[in-house]
Image (cartoon, coloured by chain):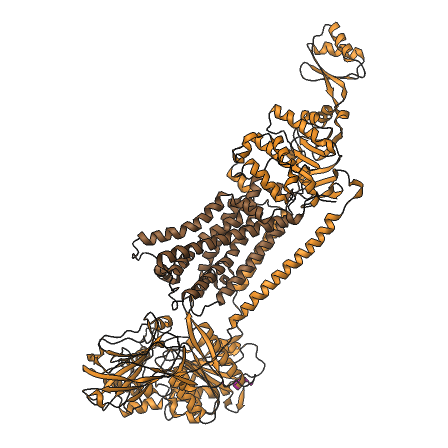
Amino acid sequence: MSLSSRLRRALPRPTRRRVVSGSVVLVLVAALVGWAVWPDRPGWTSADEQITVKTGPAGAESVDLDARLYLPRDRSGKVPAVLLAHGFGGTKDSVSDNAEELADRGYAVLTWTAQGFGRSGGQIHLDSPDYEVRDAQGLLDWLAARPEIQLDATGDPRVAVVGGSYGGALALLLAGQDARVDTIVPSITWNDLTKVFLQQSADTTATGVFKKGWAGLYFGNGAASLLPDQPVQKNEDPACGRFAADVCAAYLSLATTGTADQATLDLLRKSSPATVLSKIKAPTLLIQGEVDTLFPLSEADANAKGIAATGTPVRVAWFTGGHDGGAGPQTDQDRVKYLTVQWLDHYLKGEGDAPSDSFTYSRVAGFSALDRGLVTNGYSTEAYPSLSGTGSTQVSLEGSAQPIANPPNGNPAALSSLPGTGGRLSELLGGVAADIPGQYATFESTPVTGAIEVAGAPSIQLRAASPTGEATVFVKLYDVDESGAETLSAGLVAPVRLTGLPTSIEQAQPVTVTLPAIVRRIDSGHTVRIVVATSDQAFLTPAKPVTYTVAAGSTLTLPTVVGTPIANPQTVWRWVLGGLLVVIALGLAVVLLVRRGLRRRRHDEVIEEYAETPLVVRELRKAYADGFVAVEEVSFTVQRGQVVGLLGPNGAGKTTTLRVLMGLTMPTGGDALVFGHRLMPGAPILSRVGALVEGPGFLPHLSGYENLRAYWRASGRPEADAHFDEALRIAGLGDSVHRKTKKYSHGMRQRLAIAQAMLGLPELLVLDEPTDGLDPPQIAEMRRVLKRYATDGRAVLVSSHLLAEVEQTCTHAVVVNKGRIVASGPVDDIVGESPSVQIEVSDVPAASAVLASLGVKSVLPDGPSGLIVDMNGTPRSEVVASLVRAGVDVDRVVPRRRLEDAFLALVGDNSRGSGDR
Amino acid sequence: MSAVTGYRPSATLPIWAEVRRQASRRRTQLALGFMVLLPIIILVAFEFGGGNDDDGNGGGAFGSLVDLATSGGLNFALFCLAVSAGFLLVVVVALFCGDPVASEASWGSLRYLLAIPVPRVRLLAVKLVVALGYSLVALLTLASTGLLIGTLRYGWHPLGSTVAAAIPPGQGLLRLLGIVAYLAIIMLVVAGLAFLLSVLTDAALGAVGGAVLLWILSSILDQITALGSVRNLLPTHYSDAWLGLLSTPPQVDDLVKGAIAAICYATLFWSLAFWRFTRKDITS
């Protein structure tokens, strides 16, 4: 078979119905994809604004702020506003996503680029109350003048301030300076810049350790205004960039010495919300990151305590992210977004109940297996437990006093975090941490016996001795698993700077070191390791080499919080899965019940009139989907004891008729009844029919015998009913019956197929071209078999395109051509002698004359030397005698038969079947 | 009396008869045999392959499983499953599910089964159940062979993973069973697709190849991030979600979504197959 015809077989024929349904499916799929990727029409409009505000200590300077106002598209009346502030180094564009979301929720959102950044004028004053905060007050005035904005009083807009980091501090400072602010949502921001950049984790008054990594990064960010596409400011100092001179000077001094003079301290203090907390009356939602070495959880803790002290509502939430961790996993982002919206809806719009006081946080559960991102679980407690937890666990540490060396100029230095890489959470948690040998001391616990759910700031006693009287060390808490892999939670370290130390460890007084707050589950069997190191790349350490001696106290206090897990919204899919299974099971049950009912009704119907007739075919018609009519109208009956021949040329519709009889094809019209039951696919009555249609079909890898067994097993009937021996005798394959059928010749397969059709001795045997491929003795044997088969009240229907075959085998014949019955009746009736003979003579004209004189009915020429003569009762002997007498040689006289007449007259010269029409 | 004595529609084509029909076929024996052979080949490769050449597997969640494969029987079995899940299992399942109806049609034996008569729904149901059974046996054979020879060679150790702490052996065995179960569910899509094609065509190879082809096509589309959320609807989108069972605690959200997708697709394909088969004219 050629490839193209194979393809044609494999592919469905393109009928009108298929084309239509195919196009419909295609259009639906295209529509679905289109719908999925079609951009939504935003629910807001936005306009860029250039807002000029008064700034400076006296309010005498003017500065242009590059701003953008988002307004909800479908607003009814005036709407409350949100002042959305960006982080350090950003512009109004950095918060556009947030702004759009809030505008979608029905708020007017004003974003602006803080002075000293982007296209706004002015200089960076680090959220100074005289500059950036005053700018924001000017924006409040501007908002109050807008007709779209809801007002609390004249000049007092209904407004919230939302922002992260630099913007978060602005929210706090503005709320402390301007009572018009109705609520604030500051996130990942600071409380006191002096403590942030000079971090001190021990309870001592000594100045802390300079956080050079982050400070340098931020200073670089602010100085980076000399970008090609930004307007160059006049009088710009390359050392300071767009930083205000006082800020620049403070940085340069701090970064050089590592200690702060009073002017620097004052400047940093001024930019710290810590100074205004008691004045904040706006309800505050504080969101702080657990993976944040710049503004650790302790900053938010201080803010929360300060604001709550005056009775202002404060709510705290932690998420797994921050300046090191980025926005965090999706679940955390969703939670923070939900909390923010809930907060604003209540305190700004006045919608919804007051948010509860509950505290929510998240803990890393592992990596996402698919995208390698972090997966966190959310937890909640009824109230904010601060950094000391709701409980605590003491862990004993072992380890004696150890000497550790401070490297000159802090090089090489241990690595704990990578400031500014932002969002590389998995690396931080996977452990970039590395300590330098000789520079650290370890104090380790025994494996913990039960899991410890740490949430808060652990604390430990530390003693140190130094020949210089001063020591700068970094205390870290590692979680060490059974295999020895250590993890520094979120890369957080506790910098400690001690002064007035003795030179000998014996005389050293213990100080309490509070480690950065972490959220971590220390699993059972893990150990806790406290490392005291002399250097860290993120901090400025003394330049001179010196060797300290350090000893940790024997008790580490771990604050614990046991939170209630927040239901993961994803669990809804589990219910969906369960529901889906139930629906499928129910659907299956319904379909099966309905089918069973239909089936019973259909198959139990019996037409009594034909209950004893093996086969009645009534006005059968079959038209295929492409319009081809294989059977126009066929009716015939097969009675018990008959061997009926279905005779017709190839393509006359014989096989299609037989297919209907096997329940393979549904007729388009009419029906076929077997013992009064209508035949349809799977009708039980088919069990009384044995069939061979369109050649044998066997499993090629099984032997003939195994094929018969497999066939019978599939019938599910008792083995004794099969009459294998009889069937095998009919097949007559001898030992070949045990060979694989793929090695059989065509004739062997044919005989095996007839044997298979006879298995169980069915009452009606239907055979399509049974003698195909058999040799003459086998054909003769087959005739005997079929005749004998029909004797015990059984019936046989044989189809053939060979006249002789039907004539010799059948008791009755049905002649079909082009899908219609041409003739039918007992073979004897239609095979009886016909009144015509075929004569071959030497001289056709002479013979014709002689015959005409004899008074025959008609004489027709048949080939060059033949004549067909309708005798009209004249005996054949007389015709021959007359011809011979007249001197015409008679070569042959052949009596013609009715069936042949009928067959040839209708099928005749034109042996093409209906299939060729 | 409508049917002949001894004939009951529900007794035709017994499951066991279909099991034997398929068991005697060479491709069944070869496919199952290969499931035994593959872990052995991998083991031999690990033993004689020299090991430490870092070519290929440039990271990724999957590549790291290679490093752990020799750390214990559980990890070895996991590795065998991981390397097979993408293609080999797909082919084997497509073979078992795409072949049975189409091959009967191409041999011409389908019409004789239907003339017994085996009700069409029953014929399809039995073929489907047996095909799924063979697919499951293949999957279990692969996993258990891997576990057995891996344990014999590398010992009974915790199930290591690069995304979380090692999982103790008892728990690890459960996780491995979970992974096998999830793979079985995901493969239902292939089974459904192959079975549908098997009903639509008489060419067994076309059904098997078509199912594998569409699976690969879906995998490729899933790699194109520009398609955005449409990818979530692809049957292969969650095919690697079983990796979530290696983390502690197990991340089952994606598994649940994958299972929902697989069951939806399989139900759709099977429904279409039954709908088509009970209506079509058998012309082979």
Chain B representation colour: brown
Main SS of residues in magenta: loop
In front: A420, or B6?
Answer: B6
In front: A884, or A595?
Answer: A595
Quadrant of the rendered image containing residue A454: bottom left
In the picture, measured across the screen, residue A25 lies left or right of residue B171, that is right
Q: Which chain is orange?
A: A
Q: From which residue to which does the magenta span run?
A: A347-357
In the picture, measured across the screen, residue B249 lies left or right of residue A79, that is left
Residue farthest to the front, as pictured: A720
Q: Is residue A350 magenta?
A: yes
In front: A20, or B11?
Answer: B11
In the image, is residue A319 above or below residue A575?
Answer: below
Residue A53 visible to an observer of this rendering: no
On the image, the x and y values in percent for residue A465 come to: 22, 87
In the picture, measured across the screen, residue B18 lies left or right of residue A416, that is right
